[in-house]
Amino acid sequence: DIRVSSNKGIKINISKVNPGDKLFIPYDYLKRNGIIISGNITEKLNLDYSPNIEIFDIFNNFIQFKKDTYLNFAVVERKNLKFPTKQFFAFSPLSVIQNIQNFKLEPGDNVIIFSQDEINELLDDYNLNKTVSNIDLNINVGDLSSPHGTLENLINSLIIRIEGAVTNPGPKLVAGPLNLKDLLKIFGDVNKDSIGTISILEPIKNNSGDIA
């Protein structure tokens, strides 16, 4: 923590200093409060935190995605700087690039971008046979998803499965504000050679919280 020593004693994490005060900044302060963009990008990015820094500006000015980047789901790992806890949020990099989704970053945020293979591994690890949270289909434009205390709960809240007459049926991770047309594109769109219906499936829980 930043400490200020004055004639009134030592104060911690204050926003105002006075002439004659002595300021002590720990060596790891910038590291703990900086913003990290990592994962399936050409180069990991470490940024000093500044107020009003937004994910849209970072993505469009500093980030180059690899060809196999999965653009419908990414994670913000957010630290509580006062307590040793974390929260996990999700968003859609594609929606950010299109300026449909945007949000401010906070000190210590770690933004993680995934490849298609990594997403497949996550879907295998956190499959629909496990206990899950409620499905989060209410991501508003400009917002992050609802916070979760673990990555597993976050992922399970955002899995959507489409079966039937689509090119790529099965489970997908989706974390952006989408209409039905955009959602179907993620699944390869409607298979015109198939005859049948399309079912959008979500995990259904019983009163005990288990998959029904």
Image: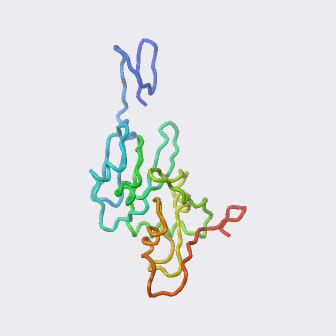
Q: Residue 26 appears at what percent x and percent y? A: 37, 32
Answer above or below: position of 95 versus 109: below
> Which residue sits furthest top?
7
Q: Residue 85 appears at what percent x and percent y? A: 52, 44
User: Which residue is at a point 58% across and 61% down the rendered structure image?
Assistant: 135
- Quadrant the C terminus occupies: bottom right
Q: Residue 108 appears at what percent x and percent y? A: 41, 43
Judged left or right of residue 138, residue 53 is left
Judged left or right of residue 3, residue 129 is right
Q: Total of numbered circles in the picture?
A: 0
User: Which residue is at a point 45% across and 25% down the rendered structure image?
Assistant: 12
Q: Residue 47 appears at what percent x and percent y? A: 32, 44
- Quarter of the image holding residue 198? bottom right
User: Which residue is at a point 56% across and 60% down the rendered structure image?
Assistant: 157
Judged left or right of residue 178, residue 22 is left
Of residues 48 and 141, the one drawn nearer to the viewer in this rendering: 141
Judged left or right of residue 61, residue 77 is right
Answer above or below: position of 31 versus 100: above
Of residues 42 and 158, the one drawn nearer to the viewer in this rendering: 158
Answer above or below: position of 30 versus 129: above
Of residues 19 and 199, the one drawn nearer to the viewer in this rendering: 199
> Which residue sits furthest right?
207
Query: What colour scheme was applied to this rendering of the protein?
Result: rainbow
- Quadrant the N terminus occupies: top left
- Quarter of the image holding residue 106? top left
User: Which residue is at a point 46% across and 53% down the rendered structure image?
Assistant: 141
